Amino acid sequence: MLLIRAPGVYAPQGDTELLLFCLRREVLGAASRVLDLGTGTGAVALAAAGAGARVTAVDLSARAVATTWVNARLNRRRVRLHRGDLAAPVADRRFDLITANPPYVPTGDAVARPGRGAALAWDAGADGRLLLDRICREAPRLLAGGGRLLLVQSALAGVPATLAALRSAGLRVAVVARRRQAFGPVMTARAELFERRGLIRPGEREEELVVVRGVRES
C-alpha cells in the first residue's frame, strides 16, 4: 500500500502495525461498516476498505483528512471522510467495527490538555488518557449488535483503566495483541518524567503496546 504523509500528520509506526495485524484477523465484507477514529494517513482505513468494507474515517486534523483523501485515491480505495472531534461527525450512525489509534503519550502537564501542531498526534494529557477515556465512553454507543472495537495504546497509559471502562460500557473485552518496542524520539525525551512517575524502571527505554478488543453482544 502506497502512503504519502503531509508534515504534521502521524507517520504509521509500531502501533499502526499492531492495529493492522488485528484488523486482518477480523471478518470483513461488503456489508461491514467500519469507522476509523483519528485516521492520520488513513493506513488502517484503507486496509479495511481493501478488505471490501464500507469505511468512514474521522480526524480532527485537516491535514490528516487531506492526506487520507490523497492516499485513498492513490490506492484506489473508497473511504468516506469527515473532519471532526472523534465520533461527533458520525454520532447518529452505527458500525460493525471501530478502529482507533489515539494519542496516548503522557505529558508533563498537571492539567490534561491536548497537544498542538504535530504533538496533537501523540500528546494525551498528564496520564495519557485524554482521548482514551473519551473513546471508551463514546465508541461503544456507536457499535451495532455484535460490533467490535479495536483500540491500540501504550501500557504506560493504563490498560486496566481501558478494560474497566469498556466493561462498564457493556462490552466484552480482552487484550488480543502485545508488542514491545524501543522508545522513539518522543518517548525518549520524556523518559525521565516517566521514571519519576514510576511508569518505567530507571534506565528502561522500552514500552509495551497492546490492542484491546471489545465486543458489543448481540
Image (cartoon, rainbow, N blue to C red):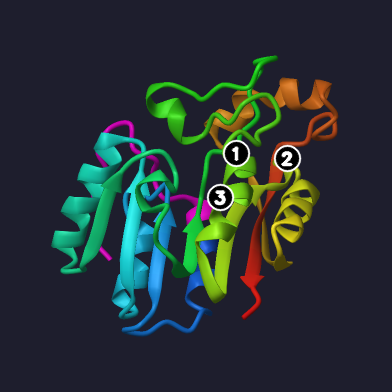
Q: Do tag 1 and tag 2 residues touch (Cβ < 8 Å)?
A: yes
Residue 147's x, y, as percent? 54, 73
- Is 158 on the left-hand or right-hand side of 190? right
Nearer the observer, 2 or 139: 139
Q: How many labels does the image show?
A: 3
Mark 1: secondary structure: loop
User: How packed is label 3: few (under 14 Cα within 10 Å), some, or many (20 or more)?
Assistant: some
Residue 79's x, y, as percent? 25, 63
Q: Mark 3 and mark 1: span between their CA atoms?
A: 17 Å
Q: Residue at x 56, y 70 (%)?
A: 148
The circle on residue 156 is 2
User: How packed is label 2: few (under 14 Cα within 10 Å), some, or many (20 or more)?
Assistant: some
Q: Can residue 129 be seen in this view?
A: yes
Span colored in magenta: 1-17
Residue 183's x, y, as percent? 62, 38
Nearer the observer, 168 or 14: 168
- Is 77 on the left-hand or right-hand side of 168? left
Q: Mark 1 and mark 2: span between their CA atoms?
A: 8 Å
